[in-house]
Image: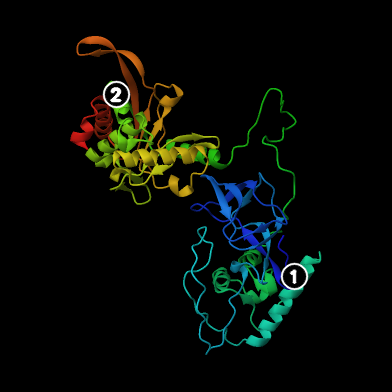
């Protein structure tokens, strides 16, 4: 195991990042490291589940794991430290270290070779930067004091004693420019703020605490919680089971309730003979360009919907309630609803309207495999325009699907099965399915919704229309 002397080591705190857009918390699913393990920049240390997906988190620096702040199964707020790592070279985490002032006449040193960040918001800068000198500060004295304080703090930490952090003598409180701006915006005098950062540095948390002091919550090293909630006194565990609603399932529930009670849903149905489509699928499976790709009814249904959207572009829109505008999309990000152990997710194929049939097959295969493995990224579930939900895989004839938030239409596909059907004047067994299209009646009227559904049905009944219409 890598060893570091007391003077060379310090502890950095890795905080829970916002791995999506505006997420406030995430649950720690699994730790891949333990105290004492050596970690390197870019190494995945844990897997977390947000309201959108499961995500692996890489550490942004080298060192030795000092402490895991929370056990598996704990839901942690974004911005909270989840792991402490002892690193070589001293200093604190980049976001907590003030920029060292440089002499006015000193030329800026070239930056180290650029590296690609391993996670949005982490990694190193790809360009050289110049730092302005701090006015009115004694540079040599301040640096000497800072080094002495950091060394004493690290020695105390490694010796098992709580370090006492003292601020270096200065006429001006130590704080980074963003923290100073925050204090100014909140009307906080930094001279009255008690610093908690390394070497007496004032952090954002200190400024917020000065506005509305809140007792700091100590991480509780508790055993991994059981998958079920503790039973209240009136709860008979032999007759009921209670499962906490969190993560993807909780987000899905909130989104569906919001969609159902915000957008006025209309659902239309059509039953169609897809015998020719099923024959075409068998032929495509023998096509050399599609070898090794996922060729199934969903592929041609997706292509049929894309053609229908091309013929009726007004269906590909969203409702901007704040601006009271209908937003027409000139691209199609095709969502595919997928059932996973963590709940229903709807990743989408970006710019699906530009893809050839082999490219669409490849994208569908990647989407399904990633969803099954629980590796769908938050970005893959954002920006959808229309969606397909295939309830037929469960043996269901059809359903009345609820719109994915922000979209105007969703197509449900029922099971495909042999049924008696009038074909060329005679009753014959044919492959038949039922389609259901739900749409937002604020921006899609009955005529437009009916045209889209009729086009999809017509293509599946006569798939050669993919050539003439597409």
State the residue at coordinates (66%, 77%): 191
Q: Position of residue 438 (x, y in %)?
A: 35, 32
State the residue at coordinates (39%, 38%): 364
Q: Is residue 160 left or right of residue 272?
A: right
Mark 2 neighbour density, 10 Å: few (under 14) some (14–19) many (20 or more):
few
In which image quadrant can residue 313 be found? top left
| Residue behind mark 1 | 5
Residue 405 can be seen, yes or no: no
Q: Position of residue 173 (x, y in %)?
A: 64, 78
Q: Is residue 110 left or right of residue 73?
A: left
Q: At numbered mark 2, what does the secondary structure look like: helix, strand or loop?
A: helix
List the single residue furthest toward the top: 426
In which image quadrant can residue 217 be found? bottom right
Q: Is residue 342 above or below residue 49?
A: above
Q: Is residue 133 above or below residue 75?
A: below
- 330 or 117: nearer the viewer: 117
**Cα distance in 3D space between marks 2 and 1:** 71 Å
Mark 1 neighbour density, 10 Å: few (under 14) some (14–19) many (20 or more):
few
State the residue at coordinates (68%, 22%): 239
Q: Is residue 379 left or right of residue 179?
A: left
Q: Position of residue 78 (x, y in %)?
A: 59, 55
Q: Is residue 449 above or below residue 72?
A: above
Q: Which mark is residue 279?
A: 2
Residue 108 can be seen, yes or no: yes
Q: For the N terminus, give its image quadrant.
A: bottom right
Q: Position of residue 228 (x, y in %)?
A: 67, 34
Q: Which mark is residue 310?
A: none
Q: For the C terminus, give its image quadrant.
A: top left
């Amino acid at each position: 195991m890598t060893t570091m002397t007391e003077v060379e080591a310090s502890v950095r705190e890795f905080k829970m990042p916002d791995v999506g857009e505006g997420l406030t918390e995430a649950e720690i699913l699994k730790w891949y490291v333990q105290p004492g393990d050596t970690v390197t920049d870019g190494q995945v240390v844990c897997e977390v589940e947000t309201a959108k997906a499961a995500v692996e988190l890489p550490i942004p620096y080298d060192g030795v794991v000092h402490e895991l702040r929370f056990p598996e199964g704990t839901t942690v707020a974004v911005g909270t430290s989840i792991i402490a790592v002892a690193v070589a070279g001293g200093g604190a985490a980049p976001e907590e270290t003030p920029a060292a002032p440089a002499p006015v006449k000193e030329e800026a040193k070239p930056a180290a070779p650029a590296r690609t960040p391993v996670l949005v918001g982490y990694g190193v800068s790809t360009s050289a930067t110049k730092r302005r000198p701090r006015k009115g500060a004694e540079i040599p004295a301040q640096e000497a004091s800072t080094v002495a304080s950091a060394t004493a703090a690290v020695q105390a930490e490694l010796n098992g004693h709580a370090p006492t952090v003292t601020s270096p003598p200065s006429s001006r409180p130590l704080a980074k420019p963003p923290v100073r701006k925050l204090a100014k915006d909140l009307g906080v005098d930094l001279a009255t703020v008690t610093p908690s950062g390394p070497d007496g540095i004032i952090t954002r948390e200190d400024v917020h605490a000065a506005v509305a002091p809140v007792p700091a919550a100590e991480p509780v090293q508790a055993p991994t919680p059981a998958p079920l909630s503790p039973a209240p006194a009136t709860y008979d565990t032999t007759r009921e089971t209670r499962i906490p609603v969190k993560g993807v399932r909780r987000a899905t529930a909130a989104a569906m309730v919001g969609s159902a009670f915000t957008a006025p849903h209309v659902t239309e149905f059509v039953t169609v003979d897809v015998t020719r489509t099923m024959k075409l699928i068998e032929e495509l499976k023998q096509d050399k360009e599609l070898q090794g790709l996922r060729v199934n009814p969903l592929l041609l249904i997706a292509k049929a919907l894309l053609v229908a959207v091309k013929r009726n572009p007004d269906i590909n829109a969203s409702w901007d309630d704040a601006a009271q505008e209908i937003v027409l999309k000139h691209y199609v990000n095709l969502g595919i609803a997928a059932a996973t152990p963590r709940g229903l997710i709807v990743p989408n194929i970006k710019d699906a309207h530009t893809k050839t049939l082999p490219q669409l097959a490849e994208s569908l295969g990647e989407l399904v495999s990633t969803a099954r493995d629980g590796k769908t990224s938050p970005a893959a579930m954002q920006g959808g325009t229309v969606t397909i939900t295939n309830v037929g895989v469960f043996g269901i004839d059809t359903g009345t699907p609820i719109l994915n938030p922000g979209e105007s239409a969703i197509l449900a596909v029922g099971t495909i099965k042999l049924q008696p059907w009038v074909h060329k004047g005679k009753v014959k067994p044919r492959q038949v399915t039922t389609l259901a299209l739900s749409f937002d009646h604020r921006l899609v009227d009955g005529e437009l919704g009916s045209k889209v559904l009729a086009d999809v049905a017509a293509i599946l009944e006569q798939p050669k229309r993919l050539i003439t219409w597409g």
